[in-house]
Image: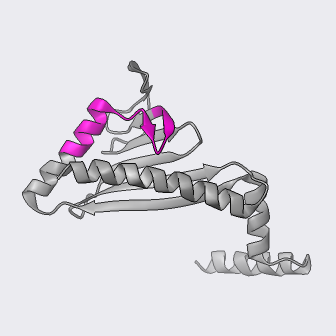
C-alpha cells in the first residue's frame, strides 16, 4: 500500500508538471485504449432451498448456455469447473482450459465484454460480474453512454434469469 501511494504521488507530480491531473490523463487513456466499466450483481438465496436454487441456476447455465446477453452474441463460454472453453454454436467442440477448478462460468461477448457467474463460497448468494470494454470513441461521454447501455441490458437479462429461478 505504501509503495502504491508513493507511485501515485509520483504520477501526480509528473502529470501536474505536464499541466494535467491524473483524472485528465485517465480520460486520455480511455479515449486511446477504450473505456472500461465493471458491475457486480448479486442475489441472496437463503437456506437449504437457496443452495439448491443456486446449484440449479449454475446447472441450467451449463446445460443450456447463453447465446446472447444484453443483445450481444456470446462467442465463447469458459467453464472453469470442467476446465473447458467452447463456442455456444458448437458446444461439442470443447478446448481445454488450464486454470484451477472453480464453480465459475464466463461468457465472452462479441463486443469484448466478459460476464462471469459464480455462487459465493461464504454467503448464500450468487454473483455475476460484468466487465465491459467500449472501444475508443469520439468522446468519453459517448463511450460511457455506450457502456452503460450495454451493462444495463446485460443486467436486465441476468435479473430476469435470477427472478425466474425463485
Q: Quadrant of the N terminus?
A: bottom right
Residue 127 at what x, y percent from top left?
33, 56
Residue at 19% over, 43% down: 56
Residue at 82% over, 81% down: 13
Q: Quadrant of residue 23?
A: bottom right
- Seen from this angle, which residue lies furthest right? 18
Residue 126 at what x, y percent from top left?
28, 56
From the viewer's perspective, is 165 left or right of 116? left
From the viewer's perspective, is 121 left or right of 79? left
Residue 67 at what x, y percent from top left?
42, 32
Q: Check the image and tell me how it is coloured.
A: one colour
User: Magenta span has 159?
Assistant: no
Vertical order, 132 against 39 (above or below): above
Closest to the observer, 24 or 4: 24
Magenta segment boundaries in residue numbering: 56-76
User: Magenta span has 57?
Assistant: yes
Labels in figure, total = 0
Closest to the observer, 130 or 155: 155
Q: Quadrant of residue 31?
A: bottom right
Residue at 64% over, 61% down: 144
Vertical order, 143 against 62 (above or below): below
Amino acid at each position: 500500500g505504501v509503495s502504491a501511494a508513493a507511485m501515485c504521488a509520483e504520477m501526480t507530480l509528473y502529470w501536474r508538471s505536464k499541466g494535467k491531473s491524473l483524472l485528465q490523463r485517465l480520460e486520455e487513456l480511455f479515449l486511446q485504449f477504450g473505456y472500461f466499466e465493471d458491475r457486480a450483481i448479486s442475489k441472496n438465496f437463503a437456506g437449504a432451498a437457496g443452495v439448491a436454487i443456486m446449484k440449479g441456476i449454475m446447472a441450467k447455465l451449463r446445460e443450456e448456455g447463453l447465446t446472447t446477453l444484453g443483445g450481444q452474441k456470446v462467442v465463447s463460454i469458459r467453464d472453469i469447473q470442467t476446465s473447458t472453453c467452447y463456442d455456444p454454436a458448437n458446444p461439442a467442440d470443447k478446448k481445454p482450459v488450464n486454470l484451477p477448478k472453480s464453480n465459475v462460468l464466463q461468457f465472452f461477448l462479441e463486443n469484448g465484454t466478459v460476464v462471469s457467474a459464480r455462487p459465493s463460497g461464504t454467503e448464500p448468494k450468487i454473483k455475476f460480474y460484468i466487465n465491459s470494454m467500449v472501444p475508443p470513441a469520439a468522446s468519453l461521454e459517448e463511450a460511457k453512454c455506450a457502456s452503460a447501455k450495454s451493462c444495463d441490458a446485460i443486467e436486465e437479462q441476468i435479473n430476469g434469469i435470477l427472478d425466474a429461478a425463485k
